[in-house]
Amino acid sequence: MSLGDEADEQTSALRAVAHPVRLQILSLLTGAAMSAAEIARELDITQANASYHVRVLARSGHVQEVGTESVRGGVAKKYAYLSEADRAARGGSGGSTFDPGDWQLQIEAIAQELRRRIRDRKPGGKGNITDAELWVTPEVWGKVASLVHEASALVHQEAQRPRAEGTIKVNMQAFLFEMNDDTKAAR
């Protein structure tokens, strides 16, 4: 695969998740394999809409078909989320080496989805919001990045089926990145 093909694949994969419904579907499929009908019921959308979005995610390698089940004389495909590590192991894009301009659609979808999630937050529930643009040592930065990566891996590994007994619905979004040091030139 040439570098141009790899960049096109990465851009396509990024665009696939640049939609609020697809972000919700990825979250659902992290905890359990589900059919389009189950996704539709959970998100209160049509089955056709859910099926369309799942196909987009499957084509881009974000989800995979993991089985089927018999439903009223028919067969329903079950899909599950593929983590970045799983996609990289299968030879797909597992990294984030895109041009920052390619991220615009996904950032806008995430912002829209965050607004919805904030509206649905539980008053008085545990949480934390951090906003920081600051200078730290490389050692501190490495530790922070490692802790956030560990927390992200933990919630994904322990994700359960929606509304499973003993679970609570939570939101986790984290954006960590080093910034250019030329801020004086930009002002």
Image (cartoon, rainbow, N blue to C red):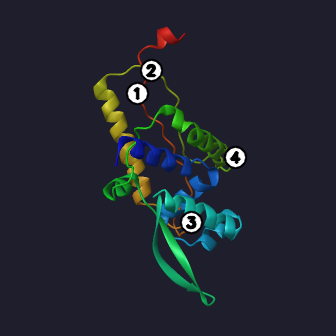
Q: Nearer the viewer, mark 2 or mark 1?
A: 1
| Pointer 1 local density, CA inside 10 Å: few below 14, some 14–19, many at least 20 | few
152 and 15: which is toward the camera: 15
Q: Earlier in the sequence, mark 2 or mark 3?
A: 2
Provide the secondary structure element on which disc 1 rests: loop
Q: What amino acid is at disc 2?
A: Leu
Q: Which residue is mark 3?
A: 162
Q: Mark number for residue 121?
A: none
Quarter of the image where the C terminus is located: top right
Q: CA distance from mark 1 to mark 4?
A: 30 Å
| 3 and 4 marks in contact (CB < 8 Å) | no
CA distance separating discs 2 and 4: 29 Å
What amino acid is labelled 4 in the image?
Arg
Q: Which mark is residue 119?
A: 4
> Residue 12 placed where, x, y %?
51, 48
Could you say where residue 95 lies in the image, as x and y percent from the top left? 38, 44
Which residue is depicted at the point 42% across and 31% down?
A: 177
Dot placed on the residue nearer the N-terminal end, 1 or 3? 3
Residue, disc 1: 178
Residue carrying label 2: 134
Q: Amino acid at mark 3?
A: Pro
| Element carrying mark 4 | helix
Among the two numbered marks 2 and 1 on one chain, the one whose residue lies closer to the N terminus: 2
Q: CA distance from mark 2 to mark 1?
A: 10 Å
Visible in this render: residue 17?
no
